[in-house]
Image (spheres, grey):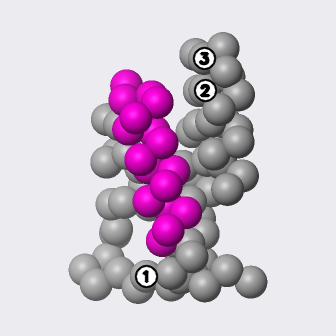
Amino acid sequence: MEDAKELNTQILKTTMLIRKQFPELSKYLLEMPETIPDVKNPEMNKQVLKEYLNSLKEILGKYAPNHTTTIQYILKLKQ
C-alpha cells in the first residue's frame, strides 16, 4: 500500500516529466478536475492523491505514444 509521501513523490515525478518531455501538456495540469476542488476545505487523503496520480498517468498514456518516438516516458512512469 502506498502512503501519502510516496504518492506525492510519484505525482511530482510525473508532473516534472510532463513539464520536461511534453511541455505542451502543462496547460492541462491546472485545468484537471482534481486540482479544482468544489469544496471550501478539501480533504487530501491517499485516495485523492492516487486519483490525481492516475489522471496524470492517463494524460501521458494517451498523448505521449502519438507524439514521441521513444519509450522513455513509459520507463519513467513505472519508476
Q: Quadrant of residue 67?
A: top right
Mark 2 vs mark 1: which is more N-terminal?
1
Residue at x 42% of width, y 55% of height: 33
Q: Are marks 3 and 2 in contact (CB under 8 Å)?
A: yes
Q: Which residue is at 60% across, 17% downward?
A: 68
* Mark toward the viewer: 3 or 1: 3
- Name the secondary structure under disc 3: loop
Q: Amino acid at mark 2?
A: Ala
Q: Are marks 2 and 1 in contact (CB under 8 Å)?
A: no
Residue located beneath label 1 in the image: 44
Which stretch is magenta? 8-24
**Residue 43 occupies which quadrant of the picture?**
bottom left
Residue 44 magenta: no
Q: CA distance from mark 3 to mark 1?
A: 34 Å
Residue 74 drawn at (x, y percent): 70, 38
Report if the CB atoms under discs 3 and 1 are less than 8 Å apart: no
Quadrant in which residue 27 is drawn? top left
Give residue 14's position: percent from left, percent from top: 51, 51
* Residue 35 located left or right of residue 55: left
Q: Which residue is mark 3?
A: 68
Residue 18 lies in the magenta stretch: yes
